[in-house]
Amino acid sequence: MSFSIHEKQDTIIALATPQGVGAIAVIRLSGNNAISLTNEVFKGKDLEKQDSHTIHFGTIRDGDKIIDEVLVSLFIAPKSFTKENVVEISTHGSSYIVNQVIKLFIRKGARPAKPGEFTQRAFLNGQFDLAQAEAVADLIHSDSEASHQAALNQMRGGFSGEISKLRAELIHFASMIELELDFTEEDVEFASRDDLRVLVEKLMRVIEQLIGSFDLGNVIKNGVPTVIAGKPNAGKSTLLNALLNEEKAIVSDIAGTTRDFIEDEINIGGVIFRFIDTAGLRETTDTIEAIGVSRTQEKMKTASLILYLFDLGDTDMIEISRDINKLENLGVPFLKVANKIDKADLGFVDELKSKHPDTIFISAGNKENLEDLRNRILELVNLDKFRTGNTIVTNIRHYDSLVKTRQSLLDVLEGLDNEITNDFLAMDIRRSLHYLGEITGDITTDDLLANIFSKFCIGK
């Protein structure tokens, strides 16, 4: 989604609130003519004589026909989201009214906004950098405390500040190396190779931390894929229903009732967990059930967390130890959850506590000890970095650029070790600067911007 010079000068319009009937709807305009166009159809005060950040009551009229009584909010450039003149019209929430108002403005010369065009204009006009612009979309789609806080931190420049600081330090050395290229015959050294090595190693440590934070960032943004696995009839569906507080899964005494996946999201401690109730783990001659069991094993390999659930009245110690060994070989974090504690043999429970003291004992049917289970689940998601305010990478594009930056910096270190010439050294440094610049938008292409902003909603 690239824009011509003419399109960038257009006044754009879109519905900023969700589609559908509601108490009010907000229609947003942005562009040099946003206020004058609104003034043509607004009956009330002369909007072109009013101050920025003021609200005015009146009517929107198509000739002599009143479309609606409205409130008009004015934001005069550059004191607006886009740094252009912005008008927000609050109408009644009828879809008919909204359509009539937007059609009227289009006839007057505005054009419908493209997805993300308001935010793209804000970026192009220097309101914030590209990473902050992307955080706007993340903030809109945040559905938990953790994802909201991560997006808010990025939108307010936390991540951008880290990257800009790294890039500024590297630019200084790059300029010194480039300067040396102009004095090759004089054999002058403006940039100390030892100082450059110290700087690159420092940058590498910070970038490694940012790259390492992506696993946590991805969890915060997209949720933790969590598989509930165990033998048929261990109570997996009952546990899912208990955690969800609704009858999402079919519960039956017939082994193998769940033959595919049932998935839903649960918010635990501000983090979204995507729980997946799977077909039971067992040998079976039923063709359909066998497919479900096979898929379960594949799901377990790609999960971030596994809840190994077993029935205390229908599982022996040998079977439990065998299953635990298999799970340990998968390399995926898992919790041992012993179900139906209300019907268990106390001697077996004591033996299990002795051999596997980290086992969680619950009764999914009676919803007993579920809070303990939730707490243990949350412990496996390390939020310490997040809660202490450290910068967390949540965007796959940023992660990719950081990985490429790391490789370029490794090339710089290798060049220093091999005492390569300044022109090759400068090339590796420039490449590092390029990848860092891609994150904040110092380096952009029309294709990159089109890909990013096309994912925004139209009114943003």
Image (spheres, rainbow, N blue to C red):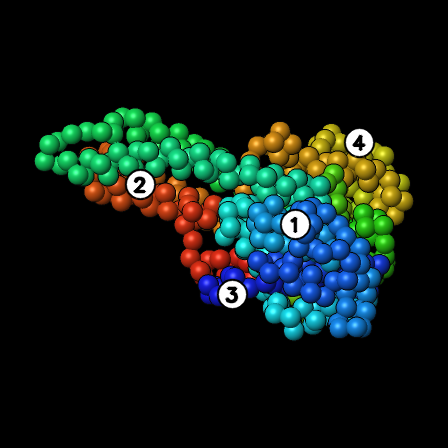
Where is mark 1, residue-wise? 75
Q: Quadrant of residue 415?
A: top left
Q: Between 31 and 332, which is closer to the camera in this rendering?
A: 31
The kind of residue tagged 2 is: Ile
Instruction: Give the residue drawn at x 30%, y 30%.
Output: 196
Q: Position of residue 407 (x, y in %)?
A: 36, 43
Where is mark 3, residue-wise? 7
**Quick check: 187 above or below 446?**
above
SS label for mark 2: helix
| Badge count | 4
Give the number of the disc on residue 429.
2
Instruction: Give the residue drawn at x 52%, y 62%.
Output: 9
Mark 3, other Cα within 10 Å: few <14 / some 14–19 / many ≥20: few
Could you tell which of marks 4 and 2 lies nearer the N-terminus?
4
Where is mark 4, residue-wise? 350
Nearest to viewer (mark 4 / mark 3):
3
SS label for mark 1: strand
Nearest to viewer (mark 4 / mark 2):
2
Q: Quadrant of residue 22?
A: bottom right
Q: Position of residue 147 (x, y in %)?
A: 66, 44
Estimate the spatial distance between the alpha carbons at disc 4 and disc 1, rounded to whole Å: 69 Å
**Quick check: 447 above or below 195?**
below
Instruction: Give the residue drawn at x 46%, y 48%.
Output: 441
The kind of residue tagged 1 is: Phe
Could you tell which of marks 4 and 1 lies nearer the N-terminus?
1
Can residue 324 be seen here? no
Could you tell which of marks 4 and 3 lies nearer the N-terminus?
3
Q: Between 51 and 157, which is closer to the camera in this rendering?
A: 51
Q: Position of residue 345 (x, y in %)?
A: 86, 38
Nearest to viewer (mark 3 / mark 2):
3
The kind of residue tagged 3 is: Glu
